Image: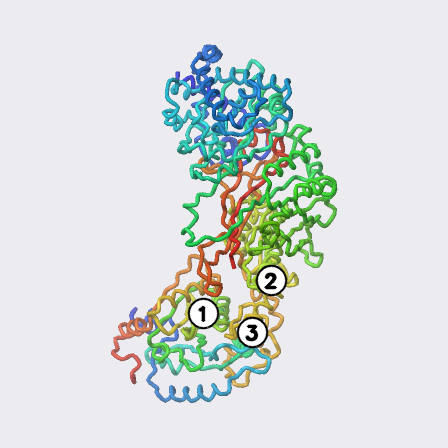
Amino acid sequence: MNNKFDALKDDDSGDHDQDQGSPKDSEKEKTEDEDKDQNSSKRKMVVPGAGEHPLQYNYTFWYSRRTPGRPASTQSYEQNIKPIGGFASVEQFWRFYSHMIRPGDMTGHSDFHLFKEGIKPMWEDDANKMGGKWIIRLRKGLASRCWENLILAMLGEQFMVGEEICGAVVSVRFQEDIISIWNKTASDQATTARIRDTLRRVLNLPPNTIMEYKTHTDSIKAWVDFHGLVNPSGGR
Amino acid sequence: MIGSILYYALYPLSRYMTSRRLHAGASKKAFPPSMDNDKALCDGGAVTTRTLSQINKLDQWLSQGSGTKGEMEERMKEPSPEQEYDTLQLMVVLHETTKKEADSKMSEGESAVKAEEAETRNGQLQDTVETPEQGDGEITDHHEVFNTKQNTEDGSISPTEDLNQGLAPGSQLACLLTEDSTQESPSPESVTRAEPRVQETTGSVQVQRLEKPMPPAETPAEVTECWDEYLASVAEGGESSSELIFSSLLSNTQPQLKVSGQHETQAGWHFPAGRGLAEELQCPLWQFPAASYYPPIDSTVGFEVTWRVWEKVDESATAAEPLPFTNASMDFTVMSYNILADDLLQANQELYTHCPLEVLDWSYRCSLLLEEIQKWEPDILCLQEVQENHYHQQLYPALSQMGYTCVYKRRTGTKRDGCATCYRSSCFSEVSVATLEFFRPETELLDRHNVGIIVLLRPVVMNGSVVKAKGPPLCVANTHLLFNPRRGDVKLAQLAIMLAEIGSVIKSCNAKGEHCNLILCGDFNSIPSMPLYQLITTGELYFQGLPAWMISGQEDLSHRAYGHRLCVPLWPSSLGITDRCQHTTAYKEESKSRSQKSGKGQYSHDFMRQLRFCPTACIRPLDLQLIPGVTDITPDASSVNQPDKSFSHTISHRLDLESVYQHVLPGSGNPEVTTLHSEGGSTVDYIFYSRRRSATWDPSAGAFAIRGLKLIGSLSLLSEDVLWSMKGLPNDIFPSDHLSLLARFQLDLNAV
């Protein structure tokens, strides 16, 4: 923390940083494999209960939090991100959601991710690597409501873009909160436009809210540039 | 010369303003919006400062002119040979053009009067004399009219005439574009825009007229389509006469009016004149006195011209693309009219102190009202403030006789008035009727006795002699929301009930695969652009924290200590209406049917939220890893009632609604008013409609689907100035303290 750069670095700052869900360190292939195994086994287990309202897709909740006091560059993104549980129906979703803290009540440098089963909340995931995300920065106090509206729209299939949606993220930061929704194909402008319009509608955003679309390739590049690494995730 | 002309033209203006100003000092009464200039003076408000200099100038003119005044008057009283010649010429022309229509019994006098009137409406070929009898006495009257009129004409200050003398009629057109073109002129062009004309004797006003550029002259065909009665007046006293034209009236003439063959069909639209023309001439007149805001009736002054002009919608501006095909369509007119219940008039007499007692008499007002309805022949008639006994004794019998089927809903509570929706049985058949009571004893907020009516109609098409219901359904909603300017929250809740009910009706149509067009009209007791209006027209309102008075904006109460602000939830969930102005049950059903039908796992937010605390959701998942502070929350079902969970800060609806009226008068930019009483005028009545968007190809029907209504035209409203010049409302012509709203729509009969 002797100079500004270090301070920034320590704070894990930079654009990519705020777009949580970025893979800072995914060098641990083992973890990834384990996750895959977990997911595949879960996939068979997670089914709607009798009389429940099935979702079009199964989803998994993830949680990540940067450990305080350690430089960001030394922390594995994958180490920090944990699957919380998967669900297949509206009722099951509420089971998880109701037992989780609201994003607006979270402290520290934390993220909730809600991704379709089988898609990791990482840029490098096959489903994400050609994709991008819409980012909305929120002043403090709005995150809980916006996040709930966002994920209900996603789970309820209100975006109407076929299989394009990958997942959604809410990031709690020091001075602001950020919500984003990821889709598969960054180059598909019709899809991204439709997602944007749906966001505006479902989030009840103030009219002057700025929405930014960012491709994951740009996110990776920005991360690499910032950290001066050729290969950000080491092993890949 | 020109200076003195200006003086005479502006003299009454200055008098008007001065008297208003004086009065403003003397009286604390609120000024109507159109008095902004005066307001600025008396309140020291920030409205405008221009007036002051205007008045100064006028004062200068006044003192300047006073030296030449007598001289001027003399000159004015001299008959002008040129003018007589002009008039004669005109009469000849008119005789020729009106030969066909002219009543064979028409006397010289009558034709003279006719000529007079025809001037103003471009020689329209109608029997314009509205006198009830055609006896000799009548003729004499008309002679008098003509003669007195002639006198005032002689005395009129009309630069146009001066300029036009000896000019060919065609070349007078240019003159009409000048400021003076509003002056009375016998040239036919001067009336081609259905220019309203006011003859005033004293203390009359014309504001802004001189600054107004005239719209380009239109071809005669346009104006003839519709006009209102012109009532000449005579100066009987020794007062100096001058002629003034009301700019706001002028502004009613639409530059965008299009020439169209259809005009002829509307040529007969003629506003009821009330009493006969001759009688009108004798009607008491008034001045703006310095001492009292509401002038006493002064029988020495008279004038009256009331113009409500039929305005066609400029198709080039509204039609995105010409339809690539021809579809069967049906035109129909809708009138919305708050007719002022007699009970309410009696209970609020202080609002009508400016009115002569005779115009407040119900039987008189009723006859004017019926005349007005008969004149415009609306196919759908939405009335508010219909008193129950009057409905049964007079209105219903009369309307039935005119071919209307009527639905009446009296307000709950002790007030005897209510709403009535009537439709012409020859045009529409009834599919369903819903009457709404906004009084909900179980909901504290909804303790006011207002009502609404929703009828679902289906166009009726005569196929030979066979009557056939055909075409897409039309939902007509009529309501009268709470007046209380401080209770915007109640108004919003009442509106939400209305919108939810409309939503149900439309949904029931959609369920049958039909698109339902919508008309929502009535007295909303809210002014344009304020939150309630916004909710209707934009479909959304962020209400959190808004002061309750602001919702309607009828009065600016920001200075008062009415601390009440809106907060979430606006109404309790027990009302069964969501923040999207839909019935909660409808939501469930909709979500259910949609998820069942599509099978694609589509759910609305509200549907999903209903399951939030279902039994399954309250059991902690076994596989949920316990992260302290993150996943150790216990679901709290009581939080389901927390406002921010079930009711957002925004209320919205999904009805695509647009107002027929634009709320400012084209040209002048003066605000339109739909209601006026002694505390001022404003727009609170509306006709909203689901507007036709572009046609889309519907592959399943194999046809172009046109949804929505196309607005064809509307009856122009008036500005507050003009209404005050007619002694306010109600008056001899308009029987209520509201004006009628009238719009014509086109409905596509093939729409799916």
Q: Position of residue A87 (x, y in %)?
A: 51, 80
> Is residue B656 depicted above or below B66 in this figure?
below
Label 1 or label 2, whichever lies nearer to me, is: 2
Label at residue B508: 2
Number of marks present in the image shown: 3
- In the displayed structure image, the side of residue A75 where residue B473 appears, left or right: right
Label at residue A160: 1
Quadrant of the rendered image containing residue A81: bottom left
**Which chain does the residue under circle 1 lie in?**
A
Alpha-carbon neighbours of circle 1 within 10 Å: few (<14), some, or many (≥20)?
some
Q: Between residues B461 and B348, which one lies in front from this camera angle?
A: B461
**Which chain does the residue under circle 2 lie in?**
B
Q: What SS does tag 1 mark?
A: loop
Amino acid at circle 1 = Met
**Which chain does the residue under circle 3 lie in?**
B
Quarter that holds the C terminus of chain A: bottom left
Cα distance in 3D space between marks 2 and 3: 17 Å
Q: Which residue is mark 3?
A: B596
Residue at 66% over, 41% down: B402
Q: Position of residue B478 (x, y in %)?
A: 62, 49
**Dots 3 and 1: beta carbons under 8 Å?**
no
Quarter that holds the N terminus of chain A: bottom left
> Do the residues indicated by labels 3 and 1 lie within the same chain of the protein?
no
Residue A176 in view of the camera: yes
Cα distance in 3D space between marks 3 and 1: 17 Å
Amino acid at circle 3 = Gln
Q: What SS does tag 3 mark?
A: helix
